[in-house]
């Protein structure tokens, strides 16, 4: 077996796709430092499944992907494929690995995507499981002897081939732990199931008693329902007979009313004509009266106008006096303003004179001040130069002190790094995470149990929903039965030539319904005719019966009152007795006298007919029944919608159960995943030991850097001392100059104070000058305003005087108008008296006619009353009949719901047996109470008990299976330990013998051996190397030189190869620490092993290159991008 080929793209410095063909024998890889030779070794390691970035000299995923150069963009991925030729297998093996910058990875075997575990399994199967055995990285050759005992043991285990046994043991332990957890879980479930079984046994006993009582109750209910239905049918026959008799009596009374109403219409026509004449006379009286009142109102209006004009005249005369007084005041103020203007002129002259005097003194002071200031500035410049020098030296000191601070910070950083590395040394296996994961496992277990309980709750909710749906379906049936009863009362035989009954085409507001039912009772139940001739012919031939309403072309209008106008859904007009809505019945009686042909109704349902009949609303009229039917239909639709909602809720609950079951499955999968993470923590423990070793090396390096920083710190402190001495001299000069500068500065200060005072005096005088000018402007503006006001007041005075003359003229005209209107008012009073006498004569005749009308109306009223009483009786019979039918329907539904039988089947079940309904009902109620005392009963308890028993038997068998499985796993682990021990001890002995020989060969003498730390426990014992080169007596391997360490490590590796030759081996500059003599011995061993092992050696040594069969050169023609060239060496063969 050997590496045949490797292909790279985007891996570290290999930007382009690069292929390298390898061969059996020795291949040398050469090239300058930093050109990417070791990247080739990293690529081989990475392709063979290495996951730790630190082993690949990186910290992040992005560091193993080509990161770009000045000319080239970074790659988005890194890809390596390795071809391995194996003569024992039919096909060559290719393993590939891809990683993307996002962190996603792909693994391939022979081009097919696989998991990392599949790749590792395949490599273990072919004997390529551990890289430490056949890949020696740069700088690691000398470190092998300093490996921890457990690490050296791992190399022997790899050679002995017991790593797969350890893996199997690890898997077995994991399975054993899982089996123990399963056993605990099964024991818990069995315990819970036993409790459930005991509970169900009690429930099953209660269920049997409950079923017996329910059976007895059903038998009694069947007999009770049979007797009840028989009684209701008998009542229905009796009430139907009474309804027929009542209808005959109603027809007779209707005929009498028709005859009297004809006579009443004739008398009423005469009465209405007389009423019209009286109304016209009254209208004339009202018109004359209105004109009289209008004239009188006009007189009052003119008198008020006269008073208004007199008041305005008086007010205008008062205003004239006020304006004349205000004009006098303005003339006085004008004189005062001119006096103030003169005073301001004198003040301005004084201020200007004072300003000129002060400015002369100020100019003298300024000249002296400028001379003193020149002396001061000269001294100040000298002082500034001294201060600047002072600042420069101080700045230099600060810079140097800053460098000192920086050094201190670097020391702190380095000490911090030492601390971090020491923390790594102190870092222990993460037991807290292990405990956390264990706690998470327990929480998951609780959550799985909680989800199970929730599943039970939702199942109970579904049962409740099914009960609610059943209840709604029963209620829906009851409403359907009520609708059927009401519709049966509405169904009438249809007659040809009619639209239908009027009530079906009428639309009214709810407030009118009760009253309208009484007034239009006959009309609402009448058929509306559309074929007049056909209906009259059928009546004459006595083919049809009932009341028929004929449409008319015109409707008589009633003036002075609003009548009810219902919406009638017909093309033709219908003539109905007029109805008006009135707030209370007393007002209806008053209006009845004025509008005798109108019927009146109130919002509470009372009605007063044109005949004088006062009717109280009945419980159920034609329109009320129609409204009730509509209400029931709405409720029916509402229940239908609720049923649909409950059914959809039931469906969603079933889906929720399905989702919960899926969640439970996912939680159990997570449970297994966390168990795997706990096992991974064991692997992390071994990695920590390697990190500690690296930390020790880093600490030594950092301590060297700290020493260099201390030396630099001493140099800077010396330089600061020199600068501080120079600073002292400069400070002395600065003090001298300051003492000379202070008297000059004080003199300048005094001059500035005097100049400031003079300037303030000038400012004050100028402000006074401005004040006088401002006052002049204000006074001039006030004089202008005053002149405008005087002009306005003069104009207003003229306007008011003109108004006064107009007011006097208008008062005279109004007085004449009042005298003329009083004469006309007396003529109107005479006309009103004559019309009043004529009305009284007509009202006397009207009273006699009214008495005759009232007699006819009283006769009609008494007959209508009798008819109303008869109708109420019939309606009560109809209602009773509907109630009996409803009771029958309810009974039928109840029979079906409670017994699943029809009414007809009851007689067969009872055999026509008799009984007392009250006694039966009493016994039924007693049984129901007894059943209710049971409370909730699980009717499926017996069935569930059988299922639980079966489940308990199944769980017990599972428990036995798990116990057997635990026993077999424990035996397998014991067997693995025995085989591992045997293989390891055999390998250890042989490798120890080989080590002694190879050490002696490479050192040309000396002693070396391998020893177990714990002979009693070889499976867990570490391995120590003891070596004594010829001529030396060493107590510690660390005392060996670098070359000796490398040669000892090679002796150990070759001992492993002699026991189990590796198919290929990669050495990265392992010959660097060897001198010529040791290098010769190393190359001699390579020659001996070459027929069995393929060697790939990265080297700079010419002797090693001479031994190679093939050479590959790595170079960087382009900065940051590695490229490969090759040549075959045939000289060795020659």
Image (tube, rainbow, N blue to C red):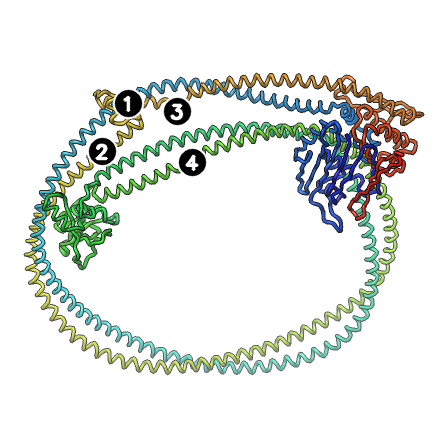
- 135, 1058: nearer the viewer: 1058
- Residue for point 30% across, 41% down: 633
Which residue is labeled 1 in the image? 924
Relative to 944, 343 lies left or right: right
Give the CA distance from mark 1 to mark 2: 24 Å
Dot 1 crowding, Cα within 10 Å, few <14, some 14–19, many 20+:
some
Residue under label 4 = 649
Disc with the residue nearer the chain's start (2 vs 4):
4
- Give the quadrant of residue 225: top left
Cα distance between the residues tagged 2 and 4: 36 Å
How busy is the neighbourhood of tag 2: few (under 14 within 10 Å), some, or many (20 plus)? many
Q: Is residue 862 left or right of residue 944?
A: left
Label pair 4/1, CB-CB below 8 angstroms: no
Sequence-wise, which precedes: disc 3 or disc 1?
1
Disc number at residue 885? Answer: 2
Res 445 → quadrant? top right
């Amino acid at each position: 077996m050997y590496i045949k080929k490797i292909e790279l793209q985007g891996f570290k410095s290999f930007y382009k796709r690069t292929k390298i063909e390898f061969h059996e024998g020795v291949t040398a890889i050469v090239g300058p430092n930093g050109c990417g030779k070791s990247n080739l070794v990293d690529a081989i390691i990475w392709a063979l499944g290495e996951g730790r970035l630190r082993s690949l000299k990186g910290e992040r995923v992005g560091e193993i992907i080509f990161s770009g150069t000045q000319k080239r963009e970074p790659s988005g991925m890194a890809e390596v494929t390795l071809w391995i030729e194996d003569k024992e297998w039919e096909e060559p093996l290719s393993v590939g690995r891809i990683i993307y910058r996002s962190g996603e990875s792909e693994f391939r075997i022979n081009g097919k995507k696989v998991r990392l575990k599949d790749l590792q399994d395949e490599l273990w199967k072919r004997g390529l499981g551990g890289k430490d055995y056949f890949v020696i990285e740069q700088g690691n050759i000398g470190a092998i002897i300093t490996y921890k005992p457990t690490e050296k043991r791992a190399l022997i285990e790899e050679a002995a081939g017991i790593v797969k046994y350890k893996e199997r043991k690890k898997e077995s332990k994991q399975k054993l732990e899982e089996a123990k957890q399963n056993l605990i879980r099964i024991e818990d479930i069995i315990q819970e199931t036993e409790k459930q079984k005991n509970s169900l046994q009690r429930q099953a006993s209660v269920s049997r008693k409950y079923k017996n009582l329910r059976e007895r109750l059903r038998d009694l209910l069947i007999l009770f329902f049979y007797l009840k239905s028989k009684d209701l049918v008998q009542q229905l026959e009796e009430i139907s007979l009474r309804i027929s008799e009542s209808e005959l009596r109603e027809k007779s009374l209707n005929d009498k009313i028709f005859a009297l109403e004809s006579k009443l219409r004739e008398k009423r026509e005469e009465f209405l004509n007389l009423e019209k004449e009286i109304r016209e006379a009254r209208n004339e009286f009202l018109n004359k009266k209105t004109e009289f009142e209008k004239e009188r109102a006009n007189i009052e209006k003119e008198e008020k106008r006269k008073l208004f004009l007199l008041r305005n005249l008086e007010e205008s005369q008062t205003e004239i006096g006020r304006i004349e007084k205000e004009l006098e005041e303005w003339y006085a103020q004008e004189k005062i303003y001119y006096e103030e203007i003169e005073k301001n002129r004198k003040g301005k002259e004084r201020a200007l004179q004072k300003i000129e005097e002060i400015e002369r003194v100020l100019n003298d002071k300024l000249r002296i001040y400028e001379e003193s200031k020149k002396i001061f500035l000269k001294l100040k410049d000298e002082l500034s130069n001294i201060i600047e020098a002072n600042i420069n030296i101080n700045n230099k000191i600060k810079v140097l002190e800053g460098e000192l601070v920086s050094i201190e910070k670097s020391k702190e950083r380095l000490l911090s790094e030492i601390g971090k590395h020491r923390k790594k040394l102190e870092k222990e296996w993460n037991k807290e995470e292990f405990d956390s994961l264990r706690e998470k496992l327990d929480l998951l277990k609780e959550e799985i149990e909680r989800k199970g309980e929730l599943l039970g709750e939702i199942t109970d909710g579904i049962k409740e929903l099914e009960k609610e749906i059943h209840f709604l379906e029963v209620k829906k049936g009851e409403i359907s039965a009520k609708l059927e009863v009401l519709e049966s009362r509405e169904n009438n035989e249809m007659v040809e030539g009619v639209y239908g009954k009027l009530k079906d085409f009428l639309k009214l507001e709810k407030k009118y319904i009760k009253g309208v039912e009484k007034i239009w009772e006959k009309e609402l139940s009448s058929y509306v005719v559309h074929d007049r001739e056909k209906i009259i012919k059928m009546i004459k031939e006595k083919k049809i019966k009932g009341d028929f309403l004929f449409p008319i072309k015109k409707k008589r209008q009633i003036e002075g009152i609003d009548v009810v106008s219902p919406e009638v859904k017909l093309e033709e007009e219908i003539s109905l007795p007029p109805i008006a809505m009135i707030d209370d019945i007393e007002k209806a009686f008053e209006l009845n006298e004025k509008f005798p042909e109108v019927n009146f109704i109130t919002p509470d349902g009372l009605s007063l007919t044109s005949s004088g009949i006062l009717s109280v609303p009945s419980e159920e009229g034609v329109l009320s029944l129609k409204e009730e039917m509509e209400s029931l239909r709405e409720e029916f639709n509402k229940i239908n919608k609720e049923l649909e909602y409950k059914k959809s809720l039931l469906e969603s609950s079933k889906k929720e159960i399905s989702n919960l079951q899926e969640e439970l499955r996912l939680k159990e999968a997570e449970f297994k995943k966390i168990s795997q993470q706990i096992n991974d923590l064991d692997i992390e423990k071994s990695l920590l030991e390697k990190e500690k070793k690296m930390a020790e090396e880093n600490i030594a390096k950092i301590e060297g850097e700290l020493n260099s920083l201390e030396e630099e710190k001493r140099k800077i402190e010396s330089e600061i001392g020199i600068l501080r001495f120079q600073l002292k001299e400069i400070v002395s000069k600065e003090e001298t100059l300051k003492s000379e500068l202070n008297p000059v500065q004080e003199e300048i200060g005094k001059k500035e104070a005097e100049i400031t005072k003079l300037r303030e005096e000038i400012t004050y005088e100028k402000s006074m000058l401005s004040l006088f000018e401002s006052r002049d402007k204000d006074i001039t503006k006030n004089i202008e305003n005053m002149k405008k006001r005087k002009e306005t007041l003069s104009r207003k005075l003229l306007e008011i005087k003109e108004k006064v003359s107009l007011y006097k003229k208008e008062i005279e005209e109004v007085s004449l108008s009042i005298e003329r209107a009083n004469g006309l008012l007396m003529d109107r009073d005479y006309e009103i008296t004559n019309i009043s006498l004529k009305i009284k004569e007509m009202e006397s005749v009207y009273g006699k006619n009214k008495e005759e009308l009232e007699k006819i109306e009283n006769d009609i009223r008494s007959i209508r009353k009798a008819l109303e009483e008869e109708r109420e009786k019939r309606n009560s019979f109809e209602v009773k009949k509907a109630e009996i039918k409803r009771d029958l329907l309810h009974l039928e539904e109840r029979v079906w719901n409670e017994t699943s039988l029809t009414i007809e089947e009851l007689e067969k079940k009872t055999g026509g047996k008799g009984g007392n309904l009250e006694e039966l009902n009493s016994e039924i109620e007693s049984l129901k109470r007894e059943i209710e005392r049971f409370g909730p009963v699980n009717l499926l308890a017996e069935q569930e008990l059988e299922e639980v028993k079966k489940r308990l038997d199944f769980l017990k068998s599972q428990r036995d299976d798990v116990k057997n499985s635990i026993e077999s796993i424990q035996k397998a682990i014991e067997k693995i330990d025995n085989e591992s021990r045997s293989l390891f001890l055999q390998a250890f002995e042989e490798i120890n013998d080989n080590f002694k020989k190879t050490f002696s060969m490479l050192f040309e003498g000396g002693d070396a051996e391998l020893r177990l730390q714990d002979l009693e426990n070889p499976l867990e014992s570490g391995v120590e190397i003891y070596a004594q080169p010829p001529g030396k007596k060493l107590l510690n391997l660390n005392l060996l030189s670098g070359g000796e360490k490398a040669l000892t490590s090679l002796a150990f590796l070759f001992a492993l190869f002699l026991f189990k030759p590796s198919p290929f081996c990669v050495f990265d500059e392992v010959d660097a620490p060897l001198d010529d003599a040791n290098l010769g011995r190393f190359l001699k061993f390579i020659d001996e092993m070459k027929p069995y092992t393929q060697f790939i050696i990265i080297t700079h040594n010419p002797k090693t290159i001479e031994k190679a069969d093939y050479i590959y050169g790595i170079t960087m023609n382009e900065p940051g991008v590695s490229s490969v060239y090759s040549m075959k060496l045939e000289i060795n063969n020659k």
